Image (spheres, coloured by chain):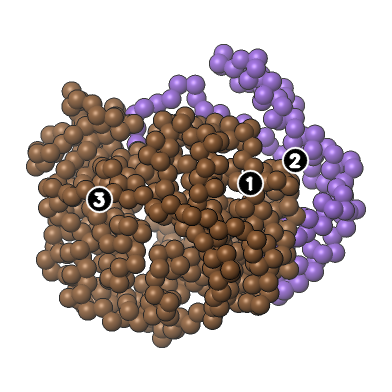
Amino acid sequence: MLVGQLSDFGNGGITDHDQDRIIRRVVGPEERLADVRTSGITAAELAQSKTALRSAFLEDMEGGFMPRFGRANLLAAFALFDDDPKRVNTILDELDKVTLDDVKAAAGRWFVSTNRTSIDSRPVSKPTTGGGQ
Amino acid sequence: MNRLTQRVVITLTAVVVALFGLPAGSTAQSTARPAIGPERAFVPPPRVERILPNGLKVIAVRFLTVPKVSVALTVQSGLAADPANQAGLAQFVADVAQEGTATRDSRQIKQEVFAMGASLTGTAGQDTTTFTIRGLADTLPQMMALLADVVRNPTFPQSEVDLIKANTEQRLQAQMASPQMVANRVYRQTLFGSHPYARVGATPETVKVIDRAAIVQYHRSYYRPNNAFLVITGDVTPDAAFAAAEKVFATWTRGVVPPPPTAPVPGLQGRRIVFVQRPNSVQSSISVGNFTIRRNDPRWPVLNVANQIYGGAFDSRLVRNIREDKGYTYSPQSVFQAMGQAGLYRAAADVRNEVTGATLKEIYGEIDTFRRDGPAVAELDNAKVYARGLFVIQNATQAGLSNTLNTMYSFGLPNDYPEQFQKHVSSLSPEAVKTGAQMLLGSENSVIVIVGDYTKVKDQLGAFANISFVDLNGKPIPPPQ
């Protein structure tokens, strides 16, 4: 479906070479999503992802839009959506409990072609020189 | 939009409304603004300093906000050390160094950084080049090893040089479409002339000249422990920080480092306009400014407060005048940038063609008023509260404190700079700030750069006798007709 959408670009400005590049770019992520959906991820990938998420969470707790703003924002989000601001203290434990099967199941549910939009934004062929910003 | 993103957007919207008020058309009951609470003094955590036998200065600060660490390795050479025909070389060195070492290729470096939950950057400024790695505290030895490998053992693969050259050419081409980017480049060229600070980075011409040999030579000359310092800030004891640093940097060999190139800062005579012709522009991107003091000048805090009052803060005179009162522009701003050898001041605003001359009149009107009268007492009080409070906020995170220390050691600021900053600001008198304004803001001798369409605005520039013209690349052209 995504590849089929390329024909909608039909403005005459795309060469065969461009088409090939675009197809590769769209199909690459598609294949990776399919991999995760059918095979899941490796234990090493899961461990690395948990480390990266833990680090990002702590960065947010300390900083965010401005220092300490991230902490306030997380408290507000947990209070608003979970009615449980204290979840800010336990969310990392929840993250640690995620298993390989959990990841595969989530990918099977969400990484499906009916659940996303793909946008390919490309510059116009003739740059404009006028106008402000 | 996924659920998490929705949550963040909704929450952010609530916070933005709380911070900046309801959108136009909304109604809300107003209440009296609460008084500002008692000020909290900024007390930085203690820092410990050691110098390794090879000359590398190591500064360690235990700062327990979160279990993470920032490590910043600063080489005391930057863009100013680039050969004149290779502007931007220092950034190339920093970029390509992260793309391959004797034992790691580009992909391995990226994978290691990700696996540690870390971030790695290398940025060349005018006087220095800083590599920063930041991640979880328990990965400090691995982060330090990776940082040292990138800084000490880069192989600068030709394929990566070629790739970054191609990407840089593309980025520069895109920047040509931005009047603000063009204005900044031409402003610096105009102000600094042949001084190394005229060069703010690569240009389409210098990208063609920069090659692997030049990158290797720059690295060999300047990336030396006796021309660098290391700041480690975060959840780590100084002993552990020093041990980690010594393990990977102790065998780094000294070198004879060339002194930073310099040249006299050109004198300014009168109000000079350099007009960058950009046909069919509907706006003029205006820059006005002059030279100021070096960063290590003890008068820096007073000029900083003067800039804040003039145009640096959102309640500044310039914003109140040409944004709030006249409606000429959305985002006027003045920037005070002090560097190792000299500093600059630059007021910038993007305005409609029809108000180009009027904006220049207001910019100079505010300068002349401020130079003549100095600040009002209440205005200065507000500016002091803002400057002191901002300093606390800027140093509330490990990365923020690391930045302050980096500035301190880069420019040789006094050892008690972080402890004394608030007191210094508090002590400023209206008379001192008036003197600071006179030093910061030139009136009769200054540079004006306008990026726009001269044919649409020339009738508004009759007050200026000295106007020269350049194209978007900064090359001289005859007056546009």
**What residue type is disc 3 on?**
Pro
Figure check: B211 above or below B119: above
Residue linked to disc 1:
B154
Closer to the camera: disc 2 or disc 1?
A: 1
Q: Position of residue B28 (x, y in %)?
A: 42, 67
Most distant residue in the bottom direction = B38
Q: Colour of chain B?
A: brown
**What residue type is disc 1 on?**
Pro
Most distant residue in the front direction = B256
Residue B100: quarter of image: top right
Residues at marks 3 and 1 on the same chain? yes
Would you say residue A67 is visible in this rendering? no
Residue linked to disc 3:
B264
Give the residue at x 66% y 25%: A22
How many C-alpha atoms fall within 10 Å of the one at disc 2: few (<14), some, or many (≥20)?
Answer: few
Q: Which chain is purple?
A: A
Residue linked to disc 2:
A115
Q: Position of residue A57 (x, y in %)?
A: 68, 63
Give the residue at x 27% y 34%: B276
Q: How far apart, in angstroms, are the residues tagged by discs 3 and 1?
A: 35 Å
Figure check: B289 above or below B92: below
